[in-house]
Image: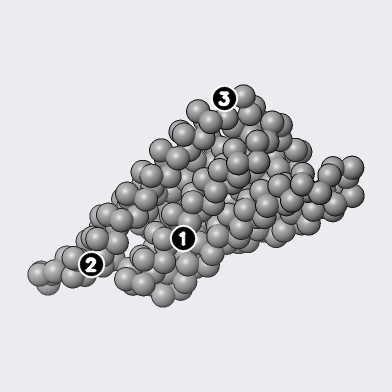
Amino acid sequence: MVRFFPKEEKFFDYFDQASDKIVNGVELFKNMMQDLSHAEEKARAIKDVEHEADRITHETVSKLHTTFVTPIDRESIYNLITRLDDILDLIDSACERVLLYKIKSSTPEALALIGILERAISQVARGVSELRNIKNPRTILDICIEINRLENDGDRTFRNALSILFNSTSGPIEIIKWKDIYETLEDAIDICEDVANILEGIVLEHA
């Protein structure tokens, strides 16, 4: 039977492009936090990636408004692309805080949270790429389980980071600075779990 209104597959390309930007963004941020020399220059590179991700999000939403038949539920498309964008927005926010607070060197706890975020983002990118194979859902569901595990790991690492911070000899201003940065990173990890929940919902809808 001929389909007069074929499904628009471009959305999968947008998802892949968005996840690529997030992978790039967290890598740039990790490198920045490992060596905070020339931090402003490194921050500009992250901001450029964030702007590119915003463009992809806007293109996706515009395409959604003009597409008759979508490959997956419209609400799921919107929720997925905006939550992907939110991850990079938070990476950029963490970067801005590092500059604002004039952070000169990182902490082991910050690097640990960034490492968890990087691994969670890697799984997010894998899950997004697997949407093209939605009829074989096991891979996506396994990825979602791993993202959930990483989010739990992030929660524990965040609590440990706060414990170390509050029991350190740092002054109150330093404590406020690092608490804000840690919370921003933990929020980004939480949104990775939000993406996993969206992916799981898409899979179950099409099972």
Check disc 3 and report the residue beneath it: 38
Question: What kind of element bears circle 3?
Answer: loop
Question: What kind of element bears circle 2?
Answer: helix
Question: What kind of element bears circle 1?
Answer: helix
Q: At 36% across and 65% down in the image, what residue appears? A: 77
Check disc 2 and report the residue beneath it: 65
Q: Amino acid at mark 3?
A: His
Q: Amino acid at mark 2?
A: His
User: In this orientation, does residue 62 appear?
Assistant: yes
Q: Residues within 10 Å of mark 2 (few under 14, many from 20)?
A: few
Q: Nearer the viewer, residue 165 or 158?
A: 165
The label nearer to you, 1 versus 3, is 3
Q: Are marks 2 and 3 in contact (CB under 8 Å)?
A: no
Going from N to C along the chain, the mark reached first, 2 or 3, is 3
Gap in angstroms between the C-alphas marked 2 and 3? 42 Å
Q: In which quadrant of the rendered image does the N terminus lie?
A: bottom left
Gap in angstroms between the C-alphas marked 1 and 3? 30 Å
Q: At 65% across and 58% down in the image, what residue appears? A: 151
Going from N to C along the chain, the mark reached first, 2 or 1, is 2
Q: In which quadrant of the rendered image does the C terminus lie?
A: bottom left
Q: Residues within 10 Å of mark 3 (few under 14, many from 20)?
A: few
Gap in angstroms between the C-alphas marked 2 and 1? 18 Å
Picture quadrant of residue 147: bottom right
With 66 as the anchor, is 102 left or right in this view? right
**Residue 80 to residue 43: above or below:** below
Picture coordinates of residue 75, whole percent (x, y): 36, 72
Check disc 1 and report the residue beneath it: 83
With 108 as the anchor, is 85 left or right in this view? left
Q: Amino acid at mark 1?
A: Arg
User: In this orientation, does residue 196 appear?
Assistant: no
Picture coordinates of residue 36, whole percent (x, y): 63, 29
Q: Residues within 10 Å of mark 1 (few under 14, many from 20)?
A: some
